[in-house]
Amino acid sequence: KTQGISIQMATPITCFKAYDIRGELNSQLTEEVAYRIGYAFAQELNAKTVVVGSDVRLTSTPLKLALSAGLIDAGATVTDIGMAGTEEIYFATKHLGVDGGIEVTASHNPINYNGMKLVKAGSVPISGDTGLNAIKEKAEALGDDYVSERLAHYTNGVTIDADAFFNGTAHVNEVKLSNTGKYAVKSCMSDYVSHMLSYVNLSNFTPLKVVVNAGNGAAGPALDAIEKEMKSQGVPIEFIKVHHDADGTFPNGIPNPLLPENRADTADAVKASGADFGIAWDGDFDRCFLFDADGEFIEGYYIVGLLAEAFIEKNTDSKIIYDPRVYWNTEDIVANAGGTPIKSKTGHAFIKERMRKEDAVYGGEMSAHHYFRDFAYCDSGMIPWLLIAELVCVKKQTLASMVKARIEAFPSSGEINSKLKDADAALERVTSKYKPQASVIDKTDGLGLEFGNWRFNLRKSNTEPVIRLNVESKGDIALMEEKTEALLTLIREE
């Protein structure tokens, strides 16, 4: 921490990434930067109405209020839906018919980080080449004196202190924002819950016991609202709640169930309670992770297949979008069910764009991002578990039994990361050895090679010297493991 936050900004702004905004607090992301982003967002989009929300981090509310001040000063009217997950902003942006939406969140990043996710009208994503770079340029171009003056107006001239910032003290005064006539707090929770439950037929539900782990993030209040409505309609579901209360200090660690070390609390609770399955979310709950009745973590890859099948059963000849890291299981399920599988480059911006182009009903990534046409083509962490719960009830099968045969038919390594000194050299080593033998060469995203009954995908990270490997086979676990080991040895040969 610094001793204080200087009101003078060191340009350029460094928290803009390819698809969102993420930065270290005080050094990269301050209330001054948040103000600039709000002003530039409204300016670039000519936005007259914007909805904002924030996750549970202590610094998210101060950043959101500074962001709102910038939006207001640029001529926008702001609707603040309060503490919310990213998908609640996606929902509210389309539902309210506003010009844009911004969620202040750092998702699963460390506690000393925060960020923002931005969408246009209709919850269309904003990436580097569709407005994010232009917003950055406009934010940097704002005069320091003007920004200082405006922040002083909203903070009554109070000096911004780094410790107070980390402790979540709101420096931009909410009441003063309200006095502008362009800031209002409004809940969309009731409408959001109704939309979530529209994806399932509640009369299909039989008695269920489910462990839910919000990780002290933003999922808890949304889940409570969904639970209340389900019970009011007589749905026989019991939730065993773990780390449920929203707490921006994250007393049980930053919620990121993608990391194996973060799964024990959910798994243990499932086994101890005799639950039918378990669910865990990340901080802003745009991803959900599932555990079977034995507490075993289910890779997101196999959930994609289940959800694809569920949609095709409801709407035959559906188009399903999937990412190119592992896909044999998805392709097999979709083809056999009568749907159309369509491969897309990895990443939410690419998946959403392809879904819109194809009018696909569903898209899924192995990273546990699931996208839905009727949810403005956006990703949701609540819709997937609702659909899975309905499947368990309708098929009268356990979650484990539904995925067991698929895992055996198409075993996969899961994504394995290797941090290297020279990622390009590793990629060249693998290409030189394996490409000449490949029966199929796929360059949708990274290097994808097929060899009859096994295949792999190798991708470089865009932000760090890391290579990401995924291997899968057709019904041969030993072969998949053997090829994975051989590839890792070659990749890590430095």
Image: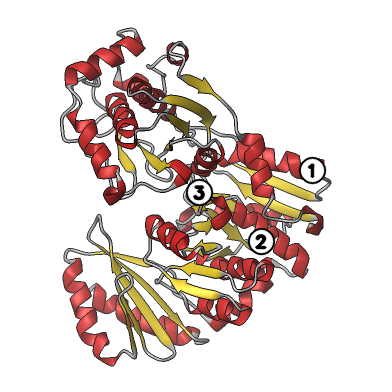
Q: What is the spatial separation of the Cα atoms under label 3 and label 2, in whole angstroms?
A: 16 Å
Residue hosting label 1: 231
Quarter of the image that includes the C terminus: bottom left
Q: Is residue 493 visible?
A: no
Q: What is the spatial separation of the Cα atoms under label 3 and label 1, in whole angstroms?
A: 24 Å
Q: Nearer the viewer, residue 384 or 207?
A: 384
Q: What is the spatial separation of the Cα atoms under label 2 and label 1, in whole angstroms?
A: 18 Å
* Local SS, label 3: loop
- Nearer-N-terminus badge (2/1): 1
- For disc 2, the neighbor class at 10 Å (few under 14, some 14 to 19, many from 20) is some
Q: Are marks 2 and 1 in contact (CB under 8 Å)?
A: no
Q: Is residue 87 visible?
A: yes
Instruction: Look at 26% across and 86% down and name the residue there.
Output: 435
Q: Whole-percent x and y of residue 472?
A: 44, 79
* Local SS, label 1: helix
- Nearer-N-terminus badge (3/2): 3
Q: Whole-percent x and y of residue 65?
A: 41, 23
- Nearer-N-terminus badge (3/1): 1
